[in-house]
Image (spheres, coloured by chain):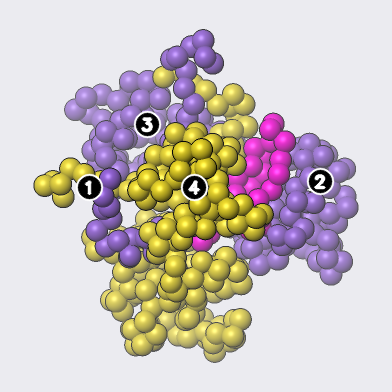
Chain colours: A purple, B yellow
């Protein structure tokens, strides 16, 4: 890496914005747009045109000055780089409130994240049917996860159980984990971990309300 | 603003990282740390020390070279700027799967976001009890929201109903909205809107899995 200064890491913020652009482009396509300028895209998402142009420069220079970016092509390029131009098999562990909501959450399947397995350790839940999937016993993760070619695990168990479940899915071969439990999970370096905390978006709002003019001294 | 170049906007990404630091500091305090260096904080959150120092420079220069930042004080400063050193009254509209999960989601109350009102338009749900809150009729938003001093509305209705609900909460005086519906809501300029899309974190994971070495040519 150090040998090629032209290579750079895509930051988390950029990946996040790519997801945002992708959704904006989906909407634009539905609205009948063939092309979109960085200025319009920036306005829709409350970003600066310079930021949009910088982010999209990752994809080479196929935006045409004066004409903008071709909506469909840009969407496909972003989908490819985000890895959502294909399906991923997902296992969900824990069907409490959050888990149940996620099983019904249509945005997952829409982006290619298909829940194939659901696990719980509650005997009353094991064997029950959630949207066509029979809940399995967590004790069977080690055999079922490789059998179903699971790439991503979504952990929606209580905080106290999360690390044990996390260790279990990793032992079963999973290398990408989305954690909803309110704890810091320890994972090996070759495992990708993201934490979903739904309170964080509320903190953006409380920040905005508190700082009506969101400016502070540098 | 233009008259004072020392003032700058805090970016969304910075606000997001402040939330992340806040959580890291909470954990550090529990673990018994009194101070933390930018290097350690960066390592925990997989950021660069330079990024951490830059973000925390917003709070003046109270980190001491060699000693690091005082954990408790930094936590309080971040809580204050994020507006989470106080309670906010929240109304939740729509008690389907996601809404029900959020009513039980302890992280909200922990950060001072207290759900005071729950609305639905389903006669079977109106009057039912969710964690001690009786579900109200959406038709009563205009009177109940100001009565209960609601600052933030969380919208968890289907996409097709979201804009109407959004217009309603704004008419009732709410100026901050967290939207879980998979649609782009239109709001006036003086209303703060954030969209929660739980698939976006999964897209970070699919990106990582797809680009095992997350490097691309600049």
Name the residue that disc number 1 marks.
B7
* Residue closer to the observer: A61 or B65: B65
- Say which residue appears at 82% left-offset and 39% top-offset: A171
**Contact check, label 1 and label 4, Cβ < 8 Å:** no
N-terminal label among 2 and 3: 3
Q: Are marks 2 and 4 on the same chain?
A: no
Residue B86 placement, left or right of A155 = left
Q: How much space separates mark 4 and mark 3, taking CA atoms?
A: 33 Å
Cα separation between marks 2 and 3? 37 Å
Q: Left or right: where does residue B92 sit relative to residue A44? A: right
Which region shows up in magenta? A176-199
Q: Which mark is residue A168?
A: 2
- Front: mark 1 or 4: 4
Say whether disc 1 or disc 4 marks the residue closer to the N-terminus: 1
10 Å neighbourhood of mark 4: few (<14), some, or many (≥20)?
A: many
Q: Secondary structure at mark 2?
A: helix
Quadrant the N terminus of chain A occupies = top right
Q: Which residue position is annotated with label 4? A: B69
């Amino acid at each position: 890496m150090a040998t090629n200064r032209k290579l750079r890491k895509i930051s988390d913020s950029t990946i996040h914005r790519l997801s945002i652009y992708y959704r904006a482009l989906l909407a634009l396509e539905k609205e009948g747009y063939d092309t979109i300028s960085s200025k319009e895209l920036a306005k829709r998402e409350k970003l600066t045109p310079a930021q949009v142009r910088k982010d999209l420069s990752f994809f080479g220079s196929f935006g045409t000055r004066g004409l903008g970016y071709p909506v469909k092509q840009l969407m496909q390029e972003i989908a490819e780089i985000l890895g959502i131009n294909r399906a991923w098999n997902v296992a969900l562990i824990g069907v409490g409130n959050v888990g149940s909501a996620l099983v019904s959450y249509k945005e997952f399947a829409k982006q290619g994240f298909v829940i194939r397995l659901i696990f719980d350790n509650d005997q009353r839940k094991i064997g029950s049917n959630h949207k066509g999937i029979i809940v399995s016993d967590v004790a069977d993760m080690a055999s079922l996860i490789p059998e179903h070619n699971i790439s991503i695990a979504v952990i929606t168990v209580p905080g106290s159980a999360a690390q044990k479940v996390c260790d279990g899915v990793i032992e079963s071969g999973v290398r990408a984990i989305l954690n909803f439990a309110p704890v810091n999970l320890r994972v090996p370096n070759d495992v990708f971990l993201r934490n979903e905390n739904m309170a964080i978006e509320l903190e953006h709002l409380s920040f905005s309300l508190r700082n009506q003019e969101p400016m502070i001294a540098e």
